[in-house]
């Protein structure tokens, strides 16, 4: 293997092991910044040593050992002698005092639990949802600040400041970087799920910019969802929502290739070429949904996954079971009421029972403050009116929706629909 190939192999290993490495280190040193610094030091050491010795059989354990040795060096040089690190320093010195072999054996028995602890820490509810998303992508996902900034159409400086503030806030809150247990875990879990789904949604339906979707964000959210599901006990009913969210993301992501036409414009669900839907992702999603339902899941993510499954199971748009979808939205509205759910419920009822049924429901929520600047509201009303044959009114609604959206491709799609009303 050439030096270049070895370096690429090392970097690939580090990408795989990075999150678990930082998780284990953060649990030891109680500081995300220091954990990231120690992990990077371990990578530098590996780049120096592995080209001569080869990649070890257990690279994760090797990197953890190297990072912990760096932590001990920092202690002995007095860099962690501040009062707040005194206890940590004593613990580490006690754990690694003696022969190097003792350090080699000091890898945590359950790295999965440490990684889950890092996810819960990055998604700490003391942070805003946007800040949690940025920190999760940086610390758990390994994205650079530049990559996160481009994904969310923000400046690198803004994202960097957000992450720095998040780390300071978490340090002040003093979490133990451990997975919460019992009632505390159940209380914190919605925060974690919210962040992962926020990341996915920004990829699936970009809120601004020229691109209607950002698949890289969807992939990252799916990866986080799979990690969370893989670390989640399947015998606890409260974990049904974990599998529900994973099912929802997998099924929705299965349509990504079919959502965009050759010209880059959005293709509505009824017009998508279902041959282009990813059947592997659909199977994964249906399997995750079955696991959620086996736990008795009836929460928002499980119900949304069931909605997505109705579309995934339909061989064509004409085969879609709209009455079942409308009934699922009735249930979703009961467990997670929101203006957006009300709007989607109106769309489902319009497809199941005719455009006039949709118009009646959408008129009931037209004055909701959360929907006043929400482009999908006039877009949906325009569709109802178009199908009802009220073309002049439909055109006005599509034009209004085009003015409200911040996504250039979506605006073009809406104006095209307005043009079709002539």
Image: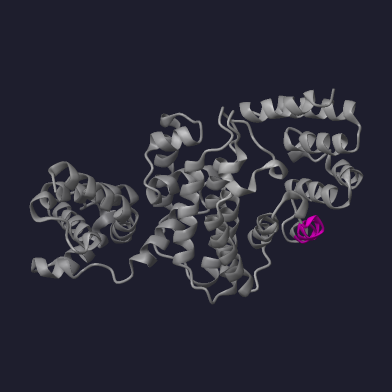
Q: Is residue 319 magenta?
A: no
Residue 273 sits in which quadrant?
top right
Q: Residue at x 85, y 30 (%)?
A: 394
At which x and y percent is residue 117? 41, 62
Q: Position of residue 282 (x, y in %)?
A: 58, 57
Identify the colour scheme used: one colour
Quadrant of the rendering where the C terminus is positioned: top right
> What residue is shown at x 50% (from left), y 57% (from top)?
225
Please state the horizontal and vertical placement of residue 297, each as a whole percent of the image. Answer: 65, 69
Q: Is residue 190 visible?
A: no
Q: Is residue 45 left or right of residue 207?
A: left
> Does residue 322 show up magenta in the picture?
yes
Front-most of 32 and 221? 221
Image location of residue 343, percent across then percent down: 78, 45
What span is colored magenta in the figure? Answer: 321-331
Please say if 53 is above or below 397.
below
Which residue occupies the extreme bottom position in the image? 235
Q: Residue at x 57, y 44 (%)?
A: 256
Front-lying residue, 318 or 236: 318
Say above or below: 310 vs 344.
Answer: below
Indicate the quadrant where residue 91 lies.
bottom left
Q: Nearer the viewer, residue 20 or 4?
A: 4
User: In the displayed structure, does residue 29 sit left or right of residue 186?
Assistant: left
């Amino acid at each position: 293997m050439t030096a270049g190939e070895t370096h690429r192999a090392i970097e690939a290993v580090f990408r795989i092991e990075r999150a678990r490495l930082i998780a284990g280190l953060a649990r030891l040193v109680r500081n995300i910044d220091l954990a990231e610094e120690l992990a990077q030091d371990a990578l530098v050491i590996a780049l120096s040593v592995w080209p001569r010795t080869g990649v070890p059989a257990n690279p994760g354990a090797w990197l953890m050992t190297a990072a912990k040795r760096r932590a001990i060096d920092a202690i002995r040089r007095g860099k962690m002698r501040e009062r707040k690190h005194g206890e940590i320093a004593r613990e580490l010195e006690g754990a690694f005092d003696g022969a190097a072999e003792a350090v080699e054996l000091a890898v945590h028995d359950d790295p999965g639990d440490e990684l889950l602890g890092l996810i819960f820490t990055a998604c700490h509810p003391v942070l805003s949802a946007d800040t949690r998303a940025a920190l999760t992508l940086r610390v758990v996902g390994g994205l650079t600040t530049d990559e996160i900034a481009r994904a969310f159409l923000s400046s690198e400086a803004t994202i960097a400041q957000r992450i720095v503030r998040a780390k300071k806030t978490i340090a002040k809150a003093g979490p133990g970087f451990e997975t919460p247990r019992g009632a505390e875990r159940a209380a914190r879990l919605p925060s974690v799920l919210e962040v992962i789904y926020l990341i996915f949604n920004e990829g699936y339906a970009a809120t601004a910019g020229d691109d209607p979707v950002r698949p890289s964000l969807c992939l990252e959210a799916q990866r986080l969802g799979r990690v969370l599901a893989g670390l989640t006990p399947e015998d606890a009913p409260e974990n049904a929502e974990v599998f529900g969210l994973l099912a929802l993301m997998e099924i929705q992501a299965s349509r990504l290739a079919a959502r965009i036409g050759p010209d880059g414009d959005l293709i509505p669900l009824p017009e998508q070429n279902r041959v282009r839907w990813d059947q592997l992702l659909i199977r994964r999603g249906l399997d995750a949904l079955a696991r959620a339902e086996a736990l008795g899941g009836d929460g928002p993510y499980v119900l949304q996954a069931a909605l997505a499954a109705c579309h995934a199971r339909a061989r064509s748009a004409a085969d879609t079971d709209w009455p079942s979808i409308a009934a699922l939205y009735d249930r979703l509205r009961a467990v997670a009421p929101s203006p957006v759910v009300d709007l989607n419920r109106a769309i489902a009822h319009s497809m199941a029972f005719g455009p006039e049924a949709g118009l009646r429901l959408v008129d009931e929520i037209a004055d909701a403050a959360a929907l006043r600047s929400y482009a999908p509201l006039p877009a949906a009303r325009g569709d109802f009116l178009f199908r009802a044959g009220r073309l002049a009114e439909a055109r006005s609604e599509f034009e209004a929706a085009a003015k409200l959206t911040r996504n250039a491709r979506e605006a073009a799609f809406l104006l095209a629909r307005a043009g079709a009303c002539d």
